[in-house]
Image (spheres, rainbow, N blue to C red):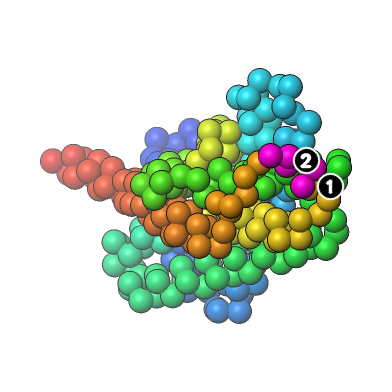
Amino acid sequence: MTYPDQTIALDKPDAAAAAQLVASSGMLKKATTPTLATLASGTFAGLIIGLGFVFYTTTQVGASDMPWGMAKTVGGLVFSGALFVIMVLGLDLFTSSTMTTLPLVEGKLGPRRLLRHWGLVYFSNMLGATLLGVLILGSGTHRYHDGEWGAVLVKSALGKVGHTWVESFTLGVLCNLLVCIAVWVGFHGKSVVEKLAAVVFPIPMFVATGFEHSVANMFIVPTALAAKAEASPELMRSLGDVQLEGLTVEAYLWWNLLPVTLGNIVGGGLLVALGMWAWQRGKAGRAGE
């Protein structure tokens, strides 16, 4: 989430401090936006994140002959376009909205308002991701390439519900550490090109390595569950002997969505937002000595 009218020149000596001011004011503005606007913004953000994974999935179809790391990196690069669009448009995405802890510790925002904002964004992101899932299933995209597209999606979902609780939590921390670093660097951007540059390293890294993004998973796993339930002949042929018993609603909610969401809050709301706040506070204290 960046705001085109609030940018900082990278060559200024106080650019880091200025970025924090922009982040704080931007997050405060987001947290106090009227409910309907937040719901609309969050719905679009959830839909766009889902579209990023649609593109990712397409790049993985037929990529089995590529080196694993290279194939995942290509997928990560195309997925980063979704975060770029969200940043430029200033849409509400739960992962970056966790940084509203910054105006909270500065005394500009109350905890009830923060939790209300998180709830609205989380719900609307889920709504957008679910809407896209319905559209993808209705379009038959999951049956493309003799069902291989859907097979990639289902295998991705199986991997996500196959982690332990602690693994999912930690993967969520690592994911949002990178996402919020990208957003924070984006606060420095003076142009669309600079905002694009902000996502080129952190976002492909989290996607290619397999870190967990709660909003992306709101599209991936429910859509895979629906494709599994439909059990089209094309999909089942492409899946072959893949065991689907572990892909359930209960596994998704307990082993993925809950721990990943909490991990995302820690990664963005604590490590990045409060970490940057503590760093700048420490610098200001040393300057006053």
Residue holding disc 2 = 238
Residue drawn at point x = 68 percent, y = 35 percent: 75
- Badge 2 crowding class, 10 Å Cα cut-off, few under 14, some 14 to 19, many 20 or more, is some
Residue drawn at point x = 41 percent, y = 46 percent: 164
Is 103 included in the stretch rendered in magenta? Answer: no
- What's the magenta bit mostly, secondary-structure-wise? helix
Residue drawn at point x = 33 percent, y = 72 percent: 111
Which kind of residue does numbered mark 1 sit on? Glu
Q: Position of residue 12 (x, y in %)?
A: 45, 36
Q: How many marks?
A: 2
Q: Is residue 127 shown above or below 101?
A: below
Q: Is residue 272 left or right of residue 223?
A: left
Q: Position of residue 268 (x, y in %)?
A: 41, 51
Residue 70 appears in view: yes
Q: Classify mark 2: helix, strand or loop.
A: helix
Residue drawn at point x = 29 percent, y = 61 percent: 105
- Considering the image in quadrants, where does the C terminus appear? top left
> Based on the displayed image, in which of its 4 quarters is residue 258 positioned?
bottom left
Residue 21 appears in view: no
Q: Is residue 69 shown above or below 121?
A: above
Which kind of residue does numbered mark 2 sit on? Ser
Residue holding disc 1 = 234
Q: Which residues are the magenta region?
A: 236-241
Q: Nearer the viewer, residue 55 or 149?
A: 149
> Based on the displayed image, in which of its 4 quarters is residue 229 positioned?
bottom right
Do the CB atoms of the residues marked 1 and 2 lie less than 8 Å apart? yes
Q: Position of residue 5 (x, y in %)?
A: 59, 55
Residue lying at the far left in this picture: please name it: 289
Q: Position of residue 74 (x, y in %)?
A: 68, 30
- Badge 1 crowding class, 10 Å Cα cut-off, few under 14, some 14 to 19, many 20 or more, is some
Is 240 included in the stretch rendered in magenta? Answer: yes
